[in-house]
Image: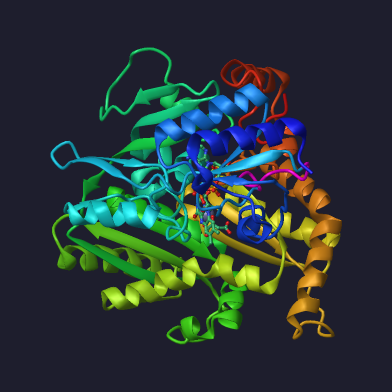
Amino acid sequence: MPSASVQAFLTEVEQQLGASCLKTDPDLISTHLIDWRGRYQGRAPAVLFPGSTDQVAQVVRLAAKHRVGLVPQGGNTGLTGASVPDDSGDQVVISLTKLQAIRAVDAANKTMTLEAGVTLAKAQDEADALGLLFPLTLPSRGSATIGGNLATNCGGTAVLRYGNARALCLGLEVVTATGEIWSGLRGLRKDNTGYDLRDLFIGSEGTLGIITAAVLALSPKPAALMTALAKVPSVESAVGLLGLAQKKGAAQLTGFELMTKPALSLVSQYFPVLAQPIQGMGSADLVLLEISSPTGEVEAVGLLEDILSEAYESGLVQDALVAQSIQQAQTFWDIRDHITLASSEDGHQIKHDIGLPISCIPDFMVSMQKELEALLPGTRIINFGHLGDGNLHYNLACPINPNVWSDRNRRHEACKQFMQRLEEEAHHRVHNRVVSLGGSISAEHGLGVMRRDEAARYKGPVEMGLMRSIKTALDPLNILNPGKVVLV
Ligand code: FAD
Ligand code: MLT
Ligand code: ZN
């Protein structure tokens, strides 16, 4: 049973917003209480679905009155357990998915103002219809929302050229923890009028305010995009290829993703149709390169071939396949985008989302692998990601046990046990090394609950103190996503 204050809160929400704004049936709300990976399972008596900014503000005012913790949720694709409630049964989920309006477009200013519940895929389509590009892109774009993208300051596969979510947002509308509405929907590229509130809310994972709308910055659409898969002999060569591609391609290099053998093997195993066009997929590390051109295909192909032939001559690349059509380019991206899905099908992994100075990556790989092989014999290092940004998903998968592997349930149980038993120790090992090299323990996914305590271990008392001060100043009652990012 939820506490009396939560019950009183829900009664008032129903009175003020109407019964259609809340769901309480356990069967109907169960998917909102567990994260995408199935790693964090919470409890809540209800999920609220406000339909406007004013309704969000009403909900927050009632939550403040009754001291009820609210968990903002968009597409629930987050990977750090930040979008689901804890297991107290006294937090309430507030879904922003009913906020669906495209409020304004300004093609000349290259901006689009839309509400928080619009999916990233829809935002991309809207920009496309204007003849422009909203370049943020993630494998989860079909479900992830603009509100969630900004609340996590997500990255994705085009950061190298266009920046992360923060760089693509010019203004915000936010419901504060007191239930007031901050209207900061400015479409300005320059605005030095005091503290940057927008930047404070971006990346705060729903702990400082609820984003209800945003002004997004759009870009001209490139005339052509060319994609290639390059077989590299080592991660060191992949880093060399990156340097070469940046030297020759400069800002025309829009994507540079690493996919190591074990990551590709998982895609081959669980999505064999995707592997068909690539001979022997999983037998070599691959880099996916994307080049854009403002003039056209001929220039893009020329540049890509120039990069690849020099890389081949200098031994950085052993072989390469340039996509011959948009469809083939899509198949290359499909392979990349299915690594997380294939991982999930395999079973739970110990996940890392590390950021490193690119120069340190080759040595990190070698030394980390040695350390982990000693600690976790047989573990598969599923390493892939945004090498161009120095951001890798350095995940550890359970050693294959032939006795249980073909049985999905038993395999998943083995993987779960592996994760639960070794997660903390593996995180410490990987993160200690990352931090010692000047890196980050969360390059793009955020802290949520998964990395909250790890972050506190590495940040000094000054940084932690400043973070707590910000949280208590903006959310003095600790009602917005309590327990996530930083404990107060
Ligand atoms: P949710 O998961 O619903 O919420 C995430 C956080 O944002 C929570 O803290 C939540 O409380 C808060 N929040 C949500 N909406 C609001 C709002 N309106 N106001 C305030 N707070 C809010 N991430 C990357 O960075 N790069 C990737 O390449 C990438 N690839 C992915 C691939 C897959 C297959 C999956 C499953 C996930 C991937 N992610 C990636 C993670 C995830 O998709 C992103 O973090 C995304 O931005 C989350 O959006 P969402 O709408 O699903 O947010
Ligand atoms: C990706 O780049 O595909 C993601 O951030 C998802 C993941 O880390 O699993
Ligand atoms: Zn990623």
Q: Is residue 241 visible?
A: no
Q: In the visual, does 474 lie left or right of 8? A: left
Q: What is the tally of numbered marks visible in this picture?
A: 0
Residue under the image location 43 percent in, 57 percent down: 141
Question: From the viewer's perspective, is residue 212 above or below residue 195?
Answer: below
Residue 86: quadrant of the picture = top right
Q: Position of residue 420 (x, y in %)?
A: 83, 57
Residue under the image location 24 percent in, 62 percent down: 303
Q: In the visual, does 401 lie left or right of 245? A: right
In the image, residue 270 lies in the stretch drawn in magenta: no
Which residues fall within the magenta stretch? 81-88
Residue 244: quadrant of the picture = bottom left
In the image, residue 83 lies in the stretch drawn in magenta: yes
Q: Position of residue 312 (x, y in %)?
A: 39, 70
Q: Quadrant of the N terminus?
A: top right
Question: From the viewer's perspective, is residue 384 above or below residue 195?
Answer: below
Which of the four quarters of the rendered structure image does ligand 2 lie in? bottom right
Question: From the viewer's perspective, is residue 287 above or below residue 405?
Answer: above
